Every structure is written in C-alpha cells, then in structure tokens.
Image (cartoon, rainbow, N blue to C red):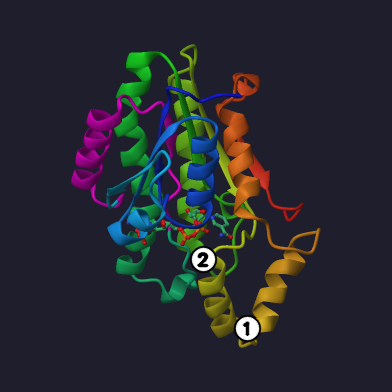
Amino acid sequence: MTLNGKHALVTGGGTGIGLAIARALATAGAQVTITGRRLEVLESVAGNSLHALAMDVSDEGSVIEGVAAAVSARGPVQICIPNAGIAEGRALHKTDAEFWRKIMSTNLDGAFFTIRECLGSMRQTDWGRVIAISSIAGLKGLKGAAAYSASKHGMIGLIRALSEDYLGQPLTFNAICPGYVDTDIITRNVTSIKERAGVSDEAARAMMVEANRHKRLIEPDEVAQAVLWLCGPGSQSINGQAIEIAGGQF
Ligand code: NDP
C-alpha cells in the first residue's frame, strides 16, 4: 500500500502510540504533521516526513490555527488521527469540575476540534480517513476512571455519528480501542493504580499484564498497523466501527 501524496495529521504524535502511527504512515509514503504541546519533544523525533507543529487540542483557537498552518505547509489533511489524550483515574466522589473538564477538554473536545478542522480538506478532496484513538475504556467502564471512560465513550459516539452524517461520501470514520499499550501513560498509570490499590509498582504492572489474555502489554506498533490498514484500499467499507486491540481483555 502506498500513501504517497497524502498528508496525515496525528495529534499527540511525538510520543507513544501517536509516534508509532506517525512513523508507520510516513513509511507508507505520507507526509505527516505531528502535534502536541511540547515542541521540543516533537522536534526531537521530526525529520524523514514527520513535521513538528505545536498545538494544544483542548484549545479551539490553537487547533484552528494549527490545522490551517499544516494545510498551508503541506496541503489538505486527508488522514486525521485524533490520538492526543490524558489518562488519569479518580473515583467520581473525588472528581471536581476542574478535573472533569481537564479530561474532557483534552480527550473529547480535542477530538471534536481536530476532526472538524480537518473535515474541510477531506470534503474538498473527496477522500478522507478519520481514525480516533479511543480505548477499551470507551467500550466498558474502567474502574476508578469515570471521567476518562466517559470521554472515551464520547469519542466513539462522535465517530459513529460522523459515519452517518457523511455516509455516501468517500470518507470513513473509525475508532481504535486499545487495551494496555506499553507507553509512558502506562508508567504513569502504574503510579495511579499503585496509589489507588495500595500495591507495589510490580503488582500494578502485573495487573495490566494479567488483563491481557496473552499476558503481555500491547506494542504501540500493533495499533499503528491497524491504523495503516484502515487507511488502505481494503478497508473502504469499514465505517463507524470501534475496533478493539486489547488481547481479548474486553
Ligand atoms: P502518551 O502519554 O505517550 O501520549 C499522549 C500524547 O498526547 C502526548 O504526545 C501528549 O503530548 C499529547 N497531549 C496530551 N494532552 C494534549 C493537549 N492538550 N494538546 C495536545 N497534545 C496533548 O500516551 P499514549 O501514546 O499511550 O496515548 C495516546 C492515546 O492512546 C491517548 O489518547 C490514550 O488515552 C490512548 N490509549 C492509551 C492506552 C495505553 O495503554 N497506553 C490504552 C488505551 C488508549 P504533549 O504532552 O506534548 O502535549
């Protein structure tokens, strides 16, 4: 498969799953704009068709400006990957409005702003792929993480609605729902699970490994390969789906 001539935008593309996706798309021939809040992180991995762009997905103005700058530099964005996210758990009775808004504004508002700003490019060129990185917490409740689960369920609702809205046009909208993937988020989750469950680092990590029926964490590239497939010609009829990559966890 070749993505020569395509321009992809991956939010949170400087680290973890986003970086694996960006590299896979670039290897297939796409020019890839990678975004995040920390320009220095993006610049440290940029080059070879990866282009760094500072953009805060929770800030509507920043997304409007960022996508416009990406389009002006590299042409219409036809592959949009809303991946930026924060995963922090807190029981609902300890969740104040500020914490709720922080999770929602990054995970759900961020996906909304990013997709909306890229839609013009896709409609104008009559081709588009939107692949949102949700979570298995978007398909089932994640204990101790009500805001995160709600935001990830919301992303799937958004994707399903868009697949209806633009039905009949050559655009597809899908979500990927990973289980525990070996990235920095996992390291941070170990800390929060450890604190919540009162267990050691090793026990917290073991809980995540145990959740996967293959008894291992998922590699970021496994998510990237699914994204690549969803951009290819063999998946044009896959639309409005939430695809699990979770080692049978759900
Ligand atoms: P990382 O922490 O490595 O990636 C998160 C990325 O999001 C970072 O690059 C970060 O960049 C970016 N980001 C966070 N907030 C913002 C913001 N306001 N504006 C722009 N960028 C932002 O973890 P992962 O790669 O694991 O996570 C990627 C996605 O995958 C997340 O949405 C996560 O919920 C989801 N996911 C991860 C799982 C896992 O087990 N790892 C499981 C299921 C889903 P910066 O800080 O520079 O802004």
**Please, what secondary structure does the residue beneath circle 2 have?**
helix
Q: Taking the image as four quarters, which one is ligand 1 found in?
A: bottom left
Q: Can residue 67 be seen in this view?
A: yes
Residue drawn at point x = 48 percent, y = 50 percent: 19
Q: Name the residue under label 2.
A: 185
Marks 2/1: CA–CA distance: 14 Å
Residue drawn at point x = 34 percent, y = 71 percent: 96
Residue drawn at point x = 54 percent, y = 49 percent: 20
Q: Is residue 240 visible?
A: no
Q: Name the residue under label 1.
A: 201
Q: Position of 181 compared to 54: left or right? A: right
Residue 70 percent coordinates (x, y): 27, 35
Q: Does the residue labelled 2 lie within 8 Å of ligand 1?
A: yes
Amino acid type at circle 1 is: Asp
**Please, what secondary structure does the residue beneath circle 1 have?**
helix
Residue 171 percent coordinates (x, y): 47, 20
Magenta segment boundaries in residue numbering: 57-85
Residue 237 percent coordinates (x, y): 62, 19
Q: Position of 248 compared to 187: left or right? A: right
Viewer-nearest residue: 47 or 237: 47
